[in-house]
Every structure is written in C-alpha cells, then in structure tokens.
Image (tube, rainbow, N blue to C red):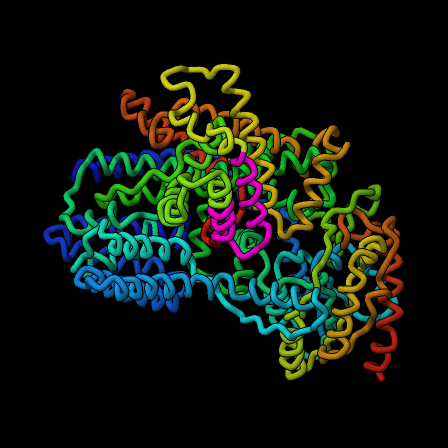
C-alpha cells in the first residue's frame, strides 16, 4: 500500500514538475499582452472617468466597437460620447454590471446587444480580461470550481499556444484585434481601410426562445432610473442574407421586446439590416461604409431624444 | 459526478484513502463506505434520484429473500413479476412515457382523431437503465435458484449502487459482483497498479480520442445539410470513434477504479472494431449488455433452439429491444433492426459463431481476407451509427442520401482541415496501439512486461496527451452513455 502511494506521489510530482517547467517557459509569451484587444476596456473606462456628465454611452458587444463613428456622433449631437462596445462573449450580466459601475447621473446610455446575447458569457474570456485588468473582476461572480477548471484549461493552452503564436507571428498578415486598433472614443478603426471579407463568420440559424435578457434589462433600467440615467435600446446591425435565414425568429424576438421591454426602443431590427457588402469579417462587424451608414442612422434615431433632453 | 471532472479527481483519492486506511479492518465498514461514497457520487447529479435507487434496492433485496423461503410456484412467479414490473415500470415511466404518448397521438392523428397530448416534464435519472438491469438480473437469478439471495442488506446496497459502474456499466451480474461484497477486501499492489493503468487508458480514450472526434462529429451532424456526402461519411467515421472512445473509455475507468478498491468487474469491450462479422462485433461491443439480453431475453424466448422462423423472430426481438434500451427514439429502433438485418445472413448460414477468437491470434498482421472482413464489418457498423447519432429519422435519411450521392466523391470539407488530418493521424496511431494490445483485456494491459523507464515514458506521454491533445474546450464533457 505504502509502495503504491509512494509511486503515485513520485509520478504526480514528476508530472507536475515537468508541467511547471513547461508552463514557466511559455508563460512570458502567453501572458496577456498590453496590446490585447480586451484591454481596450481600460482605455474606455479611463475616457468615461475623464468626462463630465451628461455624456452618451454606447454599451453592447463588438457590433458597437466595429459599428460606430463616435467622434461624428459627438460632433453632430453635441454631447461627449464613449463607446463601451467590446465583445459579446462577455455576456449580458457582465455588461450590465460594467454599465452600472461606469454611469453617473444625467448620463444617457444606448444598449445594442447581439441577438439573443447569452447572460453568463464566456468564462475564459472574462478570466482573460481580468488577468490584464484586475478591476474587471467586479463585473462577474467568481466560482472557485470554475476558476480551478479554468486554470487547468489555461495550463493546457500555455503548452499549446506558443506553437500557434510562432505561426501567426511569422506571417505579415493584418491583425486587427488589438487594443491599439481602437481610437480614443472606443471605436475600432484599424480595420477601416481593409477590404471586406466575403465569407462572414458566425453565421447560424437561431432557434427561437424567449430572451431572458429582457427581464434583466428591465431590472437594470429601474436601477439606472433611480440613479438618474436614461436608457435606450437599439438592435445590432445584421447582414441581409443572415436576416433572411433568421427573419422569423427575429420578428418573434421583436414582438417579445416590443411587448415586454420597459425602456424606449429606438429602432426595429429592419432598421439595421444591411447589405452583406457592408460587413467586415463577421455578421456583426461593419466595414467602413457600413459604419458610416449605421452612424447616420444612429444620429437620426437619437437626435429627437437628445434635443428633448436639452429642452 | 463525471469521471473526467475535477470533482471526481478529488472524490476518488479521498474515498480511496478512507477505504484502505480508515475502514479496511472490517467488511461491514468497507461496504458502508462504498454505499456512502456511491450515494454521494450519484446524488452529485441530483439528490432526488437517490430515492429511486434506494427503493429499487429495498424491493429487490426483500423479494430476493422471499424467493428463497417461498416454495409455492405461483407466489414465486408473483414475486418475480412484482420485481420486474417495479423495475421496468420505473424505467418505462422515466425513459419511455413521453415517447409512447407522442406516438399514440401520432397514431390517432393518422386515424383521423385529434387528441391533446399530456406529456410530462420528466428528468431521466442518470444510469437508470444500467442499475435497473443489474438488480433485475439478481431477482431473476434468485428466482431460477441459480443464486443464493444475500441476507446482508449493506452488501446488496453496495452491489446495486457501486459507484464505478453505477451510471454506465458494465452491467454486473450478481453472481460475479455480489460475492465480492461478501468477502473482506485486502489491498493488492499489482491490482491497484493495473487499475491505475486502465484508468489512464480510459481517460485517454475519452478525453483525447472521443472528445476530439466529437468536435468534428457534432459540427458535421448538427449542420448536416451544409456538408457533402464525403464529409458526412468522414463525420460518421469520427462518430464511430467518438462513441467507441467514449463508452469503452468509461468502461476502462470504471473497471480500473473498481480494481483500486479490490473488485474485478467484467470486460465490457474487446476491440470490437477488429471484428470480422457482425456477430463477432456484438460479442465484443458492450459485452455486459449483450450477454444480459442473451441470458434474460434471447434464451427465455427459445434462443436458437426452435425452427428458423423462431430464430429470426428472436434475433429481431433482441436487437430491437437493445435499440429501444438505448433511447426512446425511432432512430435507435431502426439501428437495432439494421443490426438484426446484418446478423440475419450469418444466422441463416449458421456462421454466426465462426469468429470466436481474436483476429490474427498470435500474429502481427492479419490475412488479406481478415482485413477485408474487418473493413466490411466496420463500414456496416458506421452506417448503422448514422441512425444512432441522428436526431430523428428524417435527419438520418438526409445524411445517408447525401453519403450515397455523387457528392461522396468530392473532397471532404471541414471547418478546420488541418486539425481533421491530425485527428485522422491520431486515430490511426490509436488503432495501431489497440491492434497491438488486442489479445488483452485492454490495450495497455501487457505493458507491465516492459522495463520501468519505458513504462513511465508511456504513462507520461498519455498524461500529457490528456492536456495537450484535448479536443473540446469544455472540460466536463459528458459521457454519451449516461443518457441511456
């Protein structure tokens, strides 16, 4: 018995030691880098802090990061703008908590979430952002078991990842997903001069289900109202080919949202259904022309509300 | 609690240490800990399931005791029927209630009358198909006086709930496992080491082989209309390896874990993809279920003793019931029928027992004839798996229609082609290892004969493969057979 346990301990110790050595060796390369796309959140939060209220805050996933010209919105609507849109994978819960933390009295918030945005989001992505930006920890609950599982998972990645990195580093290809790809307003701009990718990613047939996000947004809106913050909702941009596939589901969602969402809805889904040629690489990322078009639409939609605010 | 989860990685060493250090002195303590650990293990999914397993245990223990003392044949039959009705009743209710309701509604609609279905939101208790069959075998064996009923409730409860094989088998016979609970277990070094080795091999099969294959099989089956016949065919091959790695991997972990506690469970898989005909395949695939059906269904129905029609009828019954056991879906029934059809020529020509020993026994390479036979058997199996994996009959037919169309000759297309090629290379290496070890109970059984440094290198490679060659991002990938 003792011999058995001793051998198991020796075996596991050797495994662990080799593992530690390997992970140390690759840790430097794999550590979240200063120019990591997700760390654009730091810059966005810094801009929020630096602005007085009232200000206009856009919140949602990457459909906003790739889909707005905030500078032009700021000029035309005459209100400071921050685009918090970053990544749908963070999930609705995370984004709402982030918004709650970042808004102040008199702020105006426009949310635009990707269709049927998941509540909890991707655990790895949240952990990833936390490694480079400790403050992000307060936007999601930490589950010890998940954390340990995630550590094991990351340990695997640390061994896998270097090989992939070497490959991609050796190619002089465009890598738009970086922190420096954003401008000071929080808009992703590095892709604007790049050509449109004809094969859009993330296409899917969406099954209809009642979107639980509606109730969450309602609850959140009440909290913001108490704080003196105005909240609006608008739909994300969507390629016409993808809309054809999911038209029925989206119209059912729109019926639910119109009936149950207790905040003002600025647009219909059709307002932001756009030609496929206006998208960059995924079904939510607009290219230069698409971004211009959407910005025009957003300005038109917001103009009456902001002028009434002023009055 | 999943075998490939962090929960189990913590649970197992704790139970192991308690078992051999704290309660090893007395049999009753050992069995008590097994029952406690098994109930914790099972309750980890949903504690409400525990009442079912406890009820089943009490009923069969009581009926077993009554069957021993009762001599009146009518009362004995009533007792046996009660056990069967209760056990099958639970299984039928939890697993098949909605299936039957839905099909009755469809049948009535076909006849022109519309009825409102009243389906229930029933959660299928994990592993109910496995432990139900295990307890049934006990009562039937006691009824037939092939087995002495136990008077030790704790040992019986441990036999029914034994955590390594509780949720996905092997389905143990009382005659094999129960006596082991009646004997005090002593630690055996060689057995424990062998157990660890088999666990490691099982984890490799599940995490590296099955989960990697699942990544492609799921993508292809879930979006089957986007793929050509050739891609769907390769997707079906991936599923064939997924289900083998998944289920035989689970069995290896279960058997290995049981060995850590001093128990010997039955071999459940014997390299089925090296079978030369379907009859051999079924002697090598999910052996504990096949032999259960043979002993408790096929033979009582008359087996192969009657005329030719009787043999055909019994063959179809056993395969259809086996299909239905896997799930309440017509796809499983068709899968069973298809296997019966494959089996039929062997039955009619009386060649179903012509391949009883492992292929190319004692040789490195098989003959060309054996290679051809293995290839044909494997292909037939892969086609049958399409029904097993498909969501419904329409889905299966769509896939098969595409496979047997001109697009079969197009180059397969995957979302990650280079990964698919690496996976195919990995599968070839895996099958080579399986081939080398095919005369043992599991592929790595004989490596204890190698020198220690070589053995340890193999273990390290396997451990690192568990981390490095992981397919699915989610670490807690469920085992397919839990749903059955």
Q: Nearer the viewer, residue B185 or A118?
A: B185
Secondary structure mostly seen in magenta is: helix
Q: Nearer the viewer, residue A20 or B69?
A: B69
* x and y, in percent, of residue B281 in the image: 46, 33
Asked if residue B328 lies left or right of residue B189, the reply is right
Asked if residue A167 lies left or right of residue B42, the reply is right
Say if A225 sits above or below A75 in the image.
below
* x and y, in percent, of residue A99 in the image: 64, 69
Asked if residue B370 lies left or right of residue A36, the reply is left
Identify the residue at horizontal 25%, vertical 41% (top origin): B264
Give the position of the N terminus of chain B as an image quadrant.
bottom left
* x and y, in percent, of residue B99 in the image: 56, 62
Q: Nearer the viewer, residue B188 or A263?
A: B188
Identify the residue at horizontal 59%, vertical 47% (top origin): B334
Seen as rendered, the residue at the extreme front is B307
Q: Is residue A56 visible?
A: no
Identify the residue at horizontal 24%, vertical 47% (top origin): B175
* x and y, in percent, of residue A92 in the image: 63, 65
Seen as rendered, the residue at the extreme left is B25
Dividing the picture into quarters, in which one does residue A162 lie?
top right
Q: Is residue A143 visible?
A: yes
Say if A109 sits above or below B354 in the image.
below
Identify the residue at horizontal 74%, vertical 38% (top origin): A174
Q: Which residues are magenta?
A: B316-344
């Amino acid at each position: 018995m003792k011999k058995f346990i001793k051998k198991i301990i020796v075996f596991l110790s050797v495994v662990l030691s080799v593992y530690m050595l390997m992970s140390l060796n690759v840790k430097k390369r794999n550590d979240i880098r200063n120019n990591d796309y997700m760390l654009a959140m730091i810059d966005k939060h810094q801009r929020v802090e630096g602005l007085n209220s009232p200000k206009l805050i856009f919140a949602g996933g990457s459909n906003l990061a790739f889909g707005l010209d905030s500078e032009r919105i700021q000029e035309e609507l005459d209100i400071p703008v921050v685009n918090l849109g970053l990544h749908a994978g963070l999930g609705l819960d995370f984004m709402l908590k982030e918004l709650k933390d970042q808004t102040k009295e008199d702020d105006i918030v426009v949310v635009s979430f990707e269709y049927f945005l998941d509540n909890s989001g991707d655990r790895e992505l949240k952990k990833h952002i936390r490694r480079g930006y400790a403050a992000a920890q307060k936007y999601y609950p930490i589950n010890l078991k998940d954390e340990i599982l995630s550590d094991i998972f990351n340990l695997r990645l640390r061994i896998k990842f270097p090989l992939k990195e070497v490959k991609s580093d050796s190619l002089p290809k465009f890598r738009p997903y970086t922190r420096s790809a954003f401008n000071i307003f929080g808009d992703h701009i590095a892709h604007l001069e790049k050509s449109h990718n004809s094969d859009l990613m993330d296409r899917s047939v969406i099954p209809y289900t009642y979107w639980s996000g509606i109730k969450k947004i309602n609850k959140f809106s009440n909290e913001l109202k108490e704080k003196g913050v105005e909240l609006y909702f608008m739909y994300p941009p969507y390629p016409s080919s993808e809309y054809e596939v999911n038209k029925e589901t989206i119209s059912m969602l729109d019926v639910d949202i119109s009936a149950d969402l207790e905040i003002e809805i600025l647009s219909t889904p059709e307002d932001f259904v756009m030609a496929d040629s206006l998208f960059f690489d995924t079904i939510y990322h607009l290219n230069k022309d698409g971004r211009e078009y959407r910005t025009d639409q957003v300005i038109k939609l917001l103009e009456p509300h902001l002028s009434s605010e002023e009055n | 609690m999943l075998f490939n989860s962090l929960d189990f990685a913590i649970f197992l060493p704790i139970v192991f240490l308690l078992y051999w250090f704290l309660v090893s002195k007395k049999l009753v303590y050992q069995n008590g800990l097994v029952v406690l650990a098994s109930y914790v293990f099972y309750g980890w999914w949903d504690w409400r399931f525990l009442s079912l397993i406890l009820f089943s245990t009490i009923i069969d223990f009581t009926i077993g005791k009554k069957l021993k003392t009762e001599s009146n044949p009518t009362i004995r039959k009533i007792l046996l029927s009660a056990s069967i009705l209760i056990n099958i009743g639970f299984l039928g209710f939890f697993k098949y209630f909605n299936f039957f309701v839905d099909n009755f509604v469809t049948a009535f609609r076909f006849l022109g009358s519309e009825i409102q279905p009243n389906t229930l939101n029933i959660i299928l208790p994990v592993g109910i198909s496995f432990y139900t069959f295990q307890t049934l075998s006990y009562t039937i064996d006691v009824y037939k006086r092939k087995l002495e009923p136990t008077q030790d409730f704790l040992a019986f409860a441990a036999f029914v709930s034994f955590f390594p094989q509780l949720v996905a088998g092997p389905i143990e016979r009382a005659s094999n496992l129960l006596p082991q609970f009646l004997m005090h277990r002593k630690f055996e070094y060689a057995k424990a080491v062998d157990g660890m080795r088999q666990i490691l091999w099982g984890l490799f099969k599940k995490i590296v082989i099955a989960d990697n294959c699942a990544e492609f099989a799921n993508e292809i089956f879930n979006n089957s209309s986007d793929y050509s016949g050739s891609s769907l065919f390769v997707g079906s091959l991936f599923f064939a390896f997924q289900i083998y790695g998944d289920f035989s991997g689970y069995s290896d972990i279960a058997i290995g874990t049981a060995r850590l506690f001093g128990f010997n469970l039955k071999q459940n898989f014997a390299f089925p993809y090296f079978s030369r005909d379907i009859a051999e395949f079924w002697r090598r695939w999910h052996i504990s279920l096949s032999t259960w059906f043979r002993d408790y269904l096929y033979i009582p129905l008359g087996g192969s003793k009657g005329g030719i029609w009787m043999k055909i009828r019994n063959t179809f019954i056993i395969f259809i019931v086996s299909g239905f056991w896997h799930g309440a879906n017509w796809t499983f029934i068709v899968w069973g029928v298809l296997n019966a059809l494959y089996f039929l020529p062997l039955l009619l020509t009386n060649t179903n027992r012509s391949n009883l020993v492992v292929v190319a026994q004692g040789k490195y390479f098989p003959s060309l004839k054996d290679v051809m036979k293995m290839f044909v058997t494997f292909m037939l199996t892969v086609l049958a798996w399409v029904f097993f994996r498909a969501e419904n009959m329409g889905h299966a037919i769509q896939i098969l229609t595409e496979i047997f169309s001109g697009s079969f000759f197009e180059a397969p297309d995957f979302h990650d082609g280079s990964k698919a090629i690496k996976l195919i290379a990995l599968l070839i290496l895996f099958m080579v290892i399986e081939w080398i070890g095919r005369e043992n109970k599991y592929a790595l059984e004989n490596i204890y004969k190698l020198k220690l440094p070589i053995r340890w290198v193999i273990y390290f490679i396997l451990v690192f493969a568990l981390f490095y060659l992981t397919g699915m991002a989610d670490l807690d990938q469920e085992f397919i057979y839990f749903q059955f």
